[in-house]
Amino acid sequence: MAEPTTTTLLNVRIFNGYTLLAPSTLTISGGLITSISPFSSSVTEPAIPNAIDCDSHILLPGLIDSHIHLNGIPSLHALLASGVTTALDMGCYPLSELTPLRSLHGLPSIRSTGTAAVSPHGMHSKLIPMAPEMLLSSANEAAQFVADRVTEGSDYIKLIAELPGLDQATLNALVEASHAHGKLSIAHAATSIPYGMAQEAGVDVVTHVPLDAALDTAAVARMVAEQRIAVPTLTMMEAIVKNLPRPGFTYDPACASVTALYKAGVPILAGTDANTFMGSPCPVKHGESLHRELELLVEAGLSNVDAIRAATILPAKYFGLEDRGVVEVGKRADLVLVEGNPLEEIKATSRIVGVWCGGVKAEEGKL
């Protein structure tokens, strides 16, 4: 069935990314938000074609998961059902398998790093079946690796900091090459020494937080001073501790690191590391895991508002997604209608009443 040319949401309370507005009327047309005005109870649903009475529910910007690994069309539907309208893929090989899924009508839009930079000696080279020529053995190979990713269409460059793994010189060269192409550099770092190596390399974003020791004052101060962004993926850190127990690895350092980063003013983005590949040692479900991530961020000290912003306006800002992340006229109509007030109870983000992705309403039976 064809989408209506215009949809009007009546009696909706909008959290626009900054504040909660009084009951409003919002109009969607051509995939964009075209008007927002105060709600008048004198205007009834039958009087406006394609109008929906939202019964004073709260409307959020479409959610953004800042760390996933897409696994085909089913992942897109799972994301949509949980109100995730944009997701940032942090590693797939080859990128050509994901490219056709990037911008399907009415489904979440995807950005991707394509192939991450991995050492042949690292654990990740064993997890991901990659051609030997895709693995990096020295800093001399970094520039060509990045150039190849840019040619393939990667939106940003991901590098794996682990022990054993890429040495400091190679990490440095990868970041330098990424910046030369105008691309953000993003480092995987799940223990404290690789986290420090990622910072030393000058990456823009660090995804994960250490499980072996909480970030110390110097590490946090460096994140602040160098304006680095954190994507803690507490959902994955929780899963690793549960599924891959290892002496000295506990969830507490990860949580404490997020607390310290947040108190210091480091931008924190909500990401889950969602993955459902066969044989994955730590599978995490797409979509629903983002709501768990928001709960864990709040438990780590974020306010409810800042947790929601970590999954909306902040990833849009730091990943250059200027057309989304807020509920404003002229922006993409990526919207999530929820029951309850997530500004008071963060779990309310998961009580979804309706989702619009690029102005297309998700089928109710699939939410």
Image: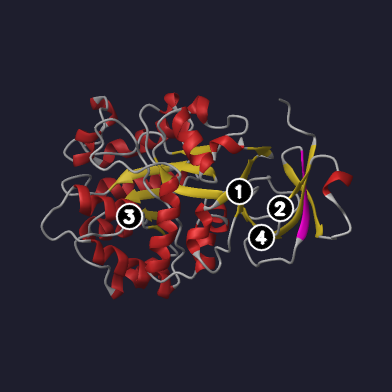
Amino acid type at image mark 4: Asn
Q: Residue at x 40, y 55 (%)?
A: 292
What is the number of the mark on residue 54?
2
Secondary element under disc 3, as helix, strand or loop, is loop
Magenta segment boundaries in residue numbering = 24-29
Name the N-terminal-most of marks 1 and 3. 3
Real-space Cα separation, disc 1 to disc 2, in angstroms? 9 Å
Q: Which mark is residue 168?
A: none
Instruction: Assess whether mark 3 and mark 1 are in contact (beta carbons under 8 angstroms).
Output: no
Check residue 354 for magenta coloring: no
CB within 8 Å, label 1 to label 2: yes
Above or below 217: residue 78: above
Relative side of 10 to 135, left or right: right
Label 2 Cα neighbours within 10 Å, binned few <14 / some 14-19 / many ≥20: many
* Badge 4 or badge 1: first in the primary sequence: 4
Q: Which mark is residue 353?
A: 1
Percent x, y of residue 346: 49, 63
Of the pair 8 and 154, the residue shown nearer to us? 8
Under mark 3, the amino acid is: His
Neighbours of disc 3 within 10 Å: few (<14), some (14-19), many (20+): many
Main SS, magenta residues: strand
* Label annotation for residue 16: 4
Q: Which residue is mark 3?
A: 208
Q: Quadrant of residue 216?
A: bottom left
Q: CA distance from mark 4 to mark 3?
A: 28 Å
The span from disc 2 to disc 3 (Cα, nearest Å) is 37 Å
Disc 1 or disc 3, which is closer to the eye? 1
Q: What distance separates the C-alpha of mark 4 from that of mark 1?
A: 17 Å
Mark 1 vs 2, N-terminal side: 2
